[in-house]
Image: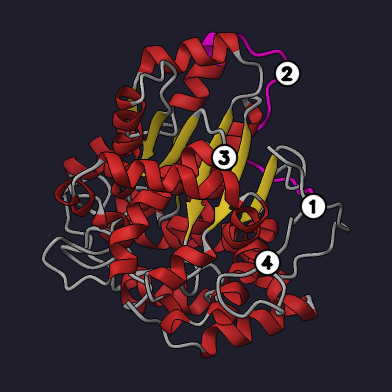
């Protein structure tokens, strides 16, 4: 991939203001450390496979992933996001954990800041400058949360910049994907934008899946590391490979989608603050949100509090410390989620025990982010501006 122009490690300005719509230029860099997970020197192929595979709720296909790791020392992983509002912990903490696992396994991660895509999807009312401000804020989140190797193994790429730089490569790809697929097949992919086939879609939103499919090949990705909600467009990319007789198909590594905090919420929603913990939420806000969260006694399935322990606390700390009074059973440290789930299902661990300990763990993870947004002038101003924006669906 063509390298961007050299920039200072502190340059995180969004694409140039000179082009107001569908515009230009950035690469963010810095290096931070986080307690999870550690890089293991000289890992075997099996060890790398186990670490990378642990990210995915689903992998298409396992044998292809193992073969890739055996043959390519530094596979390219693609992840992307629409800058569309404040960042919740599923996007902030879980992505940090996953990216750190990938870089520990010697993968290179390209994080696609999909500013044009957010504009196509009418996020921030289609205001590109606001979208790019949100993108800057999100980079600040990941830096302060402990995402490792930013500027080295981890590269942030603005879609507007990269597409403008290599339009001659990008648009023929988009056009070929669009030409080879019928409209009903593309409409099945609109879930990737948080839409459904019954929505009244704009022409831009119908074009969006063709562009996201093209991103995978444009970025020369070996692995698509996105959420389960992006699965359909990733499968479209594999179908496109079959159509053009391309042997090496992108491997799909889809991570679990964390639910919202209330009953029946399949995922966190930025437009419903009660459903999500945001990365810069104050300690008291986290306390209240988890206290009010759905957490039925003795029920493990679809219990958001237990899911947060499983997908956030255990990967971060490699354990879960239950703090409770001696008369309620005393303190206990769980080293596996299965052990905790069994204790919870039996009634040995009560929601009144679980929630305070979960709250403490989440607050500990988020504290460096809070500190950064309080003490860094640029980050503080970005957060102020993002909080003032109205989130549009």
Crowdedness near tag 2: few (<14), some (14–19) or many (≥20) residues, C-alpha within 10 Å: few
Percent x, y for residue 15?
69, 69
* Spatial CA span between label 4 and label 3: 17 Å
Mark 3 vs mark 1: which is more N-terminal?
Answer: 1
| Picture quadrant of residue 137 | bottom right
Q: Residue at x 69, y 75 (%)?
A: 373
Residue 49 is marked as none
Percent x, y for residue 120?
41, 69
Mark 4 vs mark 1: which is more N-terminal?
Answer: 4
Of residues 145 and 124, which is closer to you in this image?
124
Total numbered circles: 4
Magenta segment? 31-47
| Picture quadrant of residue 246 | top left
From the image, tell me which residue sits under label 3: 219
Percent x, y for residue 282?
55, 77
Q: Which of the image's four quarters has the C terminus?
A: bottom left
Of residues 220 and 388, which is closer to you in this image?
220
Residue 24 is marked as 4
- Say left or right for 295 vs 115: left
Q: Residue at x 47, y 39 (%)?
A: 216
Residue 41 is marked as 2
Q: Residue at x 52, y 58 (%)?
A: 92
Instruction: Judge depth for marks 4 and 1 and give the one in front.
Output: 4
Dominant SS of magenta comes to: loop
Percent x, y for residue 122?
38, 76
Residue 30 is marked as 1
């Amino acid at each position: 991939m063509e390298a961007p122009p050299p920039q200072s490690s502190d340059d995180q300005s969004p694409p140039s203001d000179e082009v107001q719509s569908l515009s230009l230029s950035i690469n963010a860099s810095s290096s931070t450390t986080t307690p999870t997970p550690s890089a293991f020197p000289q890992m075997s192929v099996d060890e790398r496979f186990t670490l990378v595979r642990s990210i995915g709720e689903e992998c298409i296909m396992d044998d292809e992933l193992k073969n890739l790791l055996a043959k390519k020392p530094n596979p390219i992983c693609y992840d992307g996001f629409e800058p569309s509002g404040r960042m919740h912990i599923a996007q902030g903490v879980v992505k940090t954990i996953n990216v750190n696992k990938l870089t520990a396994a010697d993968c290179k991660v390209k994080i696609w800041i999909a500013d044009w895509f957010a504009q196509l999807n009418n996020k921030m009312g289609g205001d590109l400058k606001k979208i790019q401000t949100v993108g800057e804020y999100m980079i600040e989140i990941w830096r302060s949360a402990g995402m490792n190797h930013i500027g080295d193994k981890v590269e942030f790429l603005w879609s507007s910049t990269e597409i403008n730089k290599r339009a001659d490569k990008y648009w023929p790809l988009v056009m070929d994907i669009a030409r080879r697929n019928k409209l009903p097949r593309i409409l099945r992919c609109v879930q990737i934008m948080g839409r459904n086939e019954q929505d009244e879609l704009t022409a831009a939103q119908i074009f969006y899946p063709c562009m996201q499919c093209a991103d995978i090949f444009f970025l020369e990705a070996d692995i698509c590391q996105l959420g389960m909600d992006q699965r359909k467009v990733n499968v479209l990319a594999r179908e496109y490979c079959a159509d053009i007789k391309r042997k090496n198909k992108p491997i799909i590594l889809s991570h679990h989608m964390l639910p919202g905090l209330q009953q029946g919420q399949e995922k966190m929603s930025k437009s419903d603050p009660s459903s999500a913990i945001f990365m810069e939420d104050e300690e008291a806000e986290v306390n209240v949100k988890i206290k009010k969260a759905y957490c039925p006694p003795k029920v493990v399935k679809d219990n958001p509090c237990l899911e947060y322990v499983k997908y956030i606390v255990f990967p971060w700390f490699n354990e879960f410390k239950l703090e409770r009074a001696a008369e309620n059973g005393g303190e206990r440290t769980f080293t596996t989620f299965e052990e905790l789930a069994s204790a919870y299902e039996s009634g040995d661990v009560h929601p009144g025990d679980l929630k305070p300990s979960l709250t403490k763990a989440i607050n500990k993870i988020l504290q460096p982010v809070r500190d950064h947004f309080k003490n860094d002038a640029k980050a503080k101003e970005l957060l102020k501006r993002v909080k003032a924006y109205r989130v549009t669906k």
